[in-house]
Image: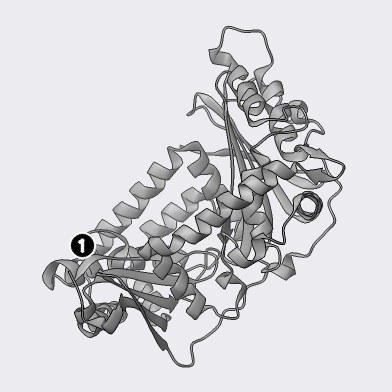
Amino acid sequence: MDINLKTIEKKGYRLHIVDHKKFKTIHFTAKFRTALNREDITKRALLPFVLQQGTAKYPTANLFRRELDNLYGSTFSIDGTKKGEQHILTARMTLANQAYLSTDENILQEGLTFFSEAIFKPKVENNQFDPKIVNKEKQTLKQKITSIVDDKIHYANIRLVDEMCKDEPYQIHVHGYLEDIDAINETNLAQYYEKVLTEDKLDLYVMGDFESVNVEGIIGDLFDRNQVSTNDEDLTIEDRHVKESQEVIEEQSIQQGKLHLGFRTHTRFQDPDYPALQVFNAIFGGFPSSKLFINVREKNSLAYYASSQFESHKGLLFVYSGIAPNDYEKAKTIIIEQMDAMKQGDFTEEQIEESKRQIINQYKETLDDPFGMIEVLYNQRVGQSDRSVFELIEAIQEVDKSMIVKVAEKMELDTVYFLTAMGGQNHE
């Protein structure tokens, strides 16, 4: 299977046309990207809630959804995430392929026009969003932020990054800050969105079976904009080395402890040894057959969960485990022993081959999902890498033991974070 990707520099954005016969539907994805910024992050967290409540042409949520229904049951969503030290607002839409409908309507034209209006022509009057919508969605965001403390795994993940990346942009909370919400109003939020539309880097992906369809011609100037140029150099990430690892222990009224560790990998998506990092993580803690799962959870019965995952664009690796508060020292020792074992090459050829199969199967599953495929392509864009997903898979197949050990040797333990019970002795 090959991906037929055509990239075109348009006015103020980059258009990616993915001609693919695999999917029966058409998929649009618009990604607005900028550097993570503490001052703006809460507005970016609020925007997805507000933008889905109507446009200038469809000014209520009901009319907005009804028009999607008219477009043969199309779907639309928008959310915000971070990749490394960049924040990305992503709008997605799924549309029926006209080839499978008994209608003469130009569904692709109508769908692209709707998608463009949803992005560029929100419900704004007198240079402000609808105050009722903004106030209502501010309450929704407040509830979302407040509820994070109830999800202890999520909370521990955030606290680990808080401590590990204290003065780095990656530490900024993607869901925004409770203390910043009240200062946001219908006017300054609309002004900020105008700034997003003119200053963020924009990539538009259009995916589907476009045989005999001139997609570029249909798109025309629908998404053109007068972008204020920004420099890619602004988005360069500093690769920090660890002088001395830190240990942070926090107590709450809980039963199960959360022992989470953060490592600096010094390997990112665009680096030649990135495929070796993927195989490393698969053996170390990425799958149920991994060292962490077997040694921490199964052999020693210490953890309710034990796994690891890496952040491709920042160069971090996180270990997550849920343990009884009394088992802190033992569990931490065993986790670090597994990392040392990786550095010493204490794993088999069979584990390497099994891990490669698992990673490649994971890629194939991702490519079976249209938005998953777009996400893989966008990782290349953000990572400024020319390596295609199929070249990446070939590189994974070529990873050997020495390459994995070399990646492991670069790992530096930065932070051990433990969320435990009050007094640290209670457990289930």
Q: What residue sits 49% from the left and 60% below the top?
A: 146
The amino acid type of the residue labelled 1 equals Glu
- Which colouring convention does the figure follow? one colour
Residue 157 visible in the snapshot: yes
Placement of 358 over or under 280, stated as above or below: above
Indicate the quadrant containing the N terminus: top left, top right, bottom left or bottom right: top left
From the top left corner, tell me how far across and down residue 54 is, in percent: 69, 34
User: Foreground residue, 376 or 253?
Assistant: 253
From the top left corner, tell me how far across and down residue 39 is, in percent: 71, 67
Label 1: state its secondary structure. helix
From the top left corner, tell me how far across and down residue 274 is, in percent: 46, 66
Dot 1: few (<14), some (14–19), or many (≥20) neighbours within 10 Å?
Answer: few
User: Foreground residue, 289 or 152?
Assistant: 152
Placement of 128 over or under 147, stated as above or below: above
Residue beneath disc 1: 350
Q: What residue sits 13% from the left and 73% below the top?
A: 300
Q: What residue sits 47% from the left and 55% below the top?
A: 392
Q: Is residue 189 left or right of residue 422?
A: right
Q: Is residue 26 left or right of residue 291?
A: right
**Identity of the residue furthest to the bottom in this view:** 243
Q: What residue sits 18% from the left and 68% below the top?
A: 297
